[in-house]
Image (spheres, rainbow, N blue to C red):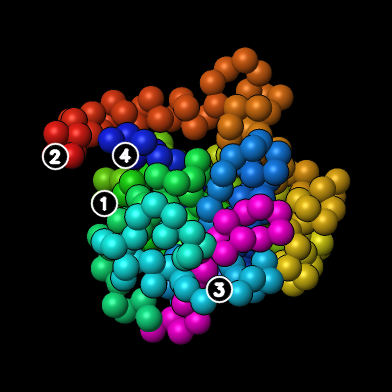
């Protein structure tokens, strides 16, 4: 989750080191869950500069994409923002990715920041589904985050890529406390225990999504599982994740949500920057 204090908005940042481990599945289901279960106004941004598939997974078509929004960001204001947003039947708003991934070549990191800021002024929560690389564009979003959902699976390539990427962020002095590791179990009983993965990554898991074949099938049918079969194991886990992030899960009790607690820490870290930015407004 992301909080930019001087603009006052929330962004969820979803990252995975390799394709095929459910990054977009988590993003779409989490977006629907936050909207339908918790009454948040949510927009999902497909910022996967490789081959983003949010539109396909939600069976959506849109004439305008995130690249169009970023190109026109200086002129977009008020209700004109709606023309860049597609609506899913669940109520989730979506800014789709370009059909041609080469279109991302014209996008500078600061344009991505500006586009997300525009969306954040309109919506309670912005979810950004990113590419599986630490590119300049993904780093632009990552740097604004105070909580990142970092998804891995039990596959060796996924674990190895996560290990290397986390080490890179450490070398860049990225605050490790903002990252929350998440295991999406996409393989049925492969014998790899989560504790072994934790040992390899030197981190504990924040959340585990159990194997559920229907999670992928839901994406193929354009219906997130939290809508089509909310009682299935995978859907229940992602619904519980939405509640936990907003402080409504059983484990949270009367405490503030994880987001709010991390936000307090983030404010302390970014206090001087936020004050300076406020002064420039």
The answer to whether the residue labelled 4 contacts the one labelled 2, judged by CB atoms less than 8 Å apart, is no
Q: Residue at x 78, y 53 (%)?
A: 227
Cα–Cα gap, marks 4 and 1:
25 Å
Q: Which residues are magenta?
A: 86-102
Q: Give whichever of discs 4 and 2 has the lower sequence position.
A: 4
For label 2, the residue is: 280
Residue 250 versus residue 13 in the image, above or below: above
For label 3, the residue is: 62
Cα–Cα gap, marks 3 and 2:
36 Å
Position of residue 225 in the picture relative to residue 256 (left or right): right
| Mark whose residue sits in front, 4 or 1 | 4
Q: Position of residue 6 (x, y in %)?
A: 28, 35
Q: Give whichever of discs 3 and 2 has the lower sequence position.
A: 3
Position of residue 73 in the picture relative to residue 129 (left or right): left
For label 4, the residue is: 7
| Mark whose residue sits in front, 4 or 3 | 3
For label 1, the residue is: 172
Q: Give whichever of discs 1 and 2 has the lower sequence position.
A: 1
Q: Residue at x 48, y 65 (%)?
A: 83
Q: Give whichever of discs 1 and 3 has the lower sequence position.
A: 3
Cα–Cα gap, marks 4 and 2:
12 Å
- Secondary structure beneath dot 1 equals loop
Q: Quadrant of residue 74?
A: bottom left
- Secondary structure beneath dot 4 equals loop
């Amino acid at each position: 989750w992301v909080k930019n204090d001087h603009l006052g908005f929330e962004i969820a940042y979803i990252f995975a080191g390799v394709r095929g481990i459910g990054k977009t599945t988590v993003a779409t289901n989490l977006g629907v869950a936050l909207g339908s279960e918790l009454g948040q106004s949510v927009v999902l941004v497909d910022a996967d500069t490789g081959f983003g598939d949010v539109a396909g997974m939600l069976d959506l078509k849109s004439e305008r994409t995130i690249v169009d929004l970023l190109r026109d960001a200086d002129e977009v204001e008020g209700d004109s923002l709606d023309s860049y947003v597609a609506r899913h039947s669940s109520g989730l708003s979506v800014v789709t990715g370009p059909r041609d991934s080469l279109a991302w070549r014209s996008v500078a990191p600061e344009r991505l920041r500006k586009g997300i800021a525009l969306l954040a002024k309109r919506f309670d929560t912005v979810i950004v589904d990113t590419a599986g690389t630490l590119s300049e564009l993904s780093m632009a979003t990552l740097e604004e985050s105070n909580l990142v959902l970092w998804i891995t699976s039990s596959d060796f390539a996924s674990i190895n890529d996560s290990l290397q990427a986390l080490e890179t962020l450490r070398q860049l002095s990225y605050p490790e406390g903002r990252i929350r590791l998440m295991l999406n179990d996409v393989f049925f009983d492969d014998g790899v225990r989560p504790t072994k993965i934790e040992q390899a990554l030197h981190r504990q898991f924040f959340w585990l999504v159990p194997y559920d074949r229907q999670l992928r099938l839901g994406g193929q049918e354009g219906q997130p599982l939290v809508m089509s079969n909310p009682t299935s194991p995978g859907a229940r886990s992602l619904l519980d994740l939405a509640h936990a992030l907003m402080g409504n899960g059983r484990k949270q009790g009367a405490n503030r949500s994880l987001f709010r607690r991390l936000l307090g820490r983030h404010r302390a870290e970014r206090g001087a920057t936020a004050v300076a930015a406020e002064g420039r407004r």
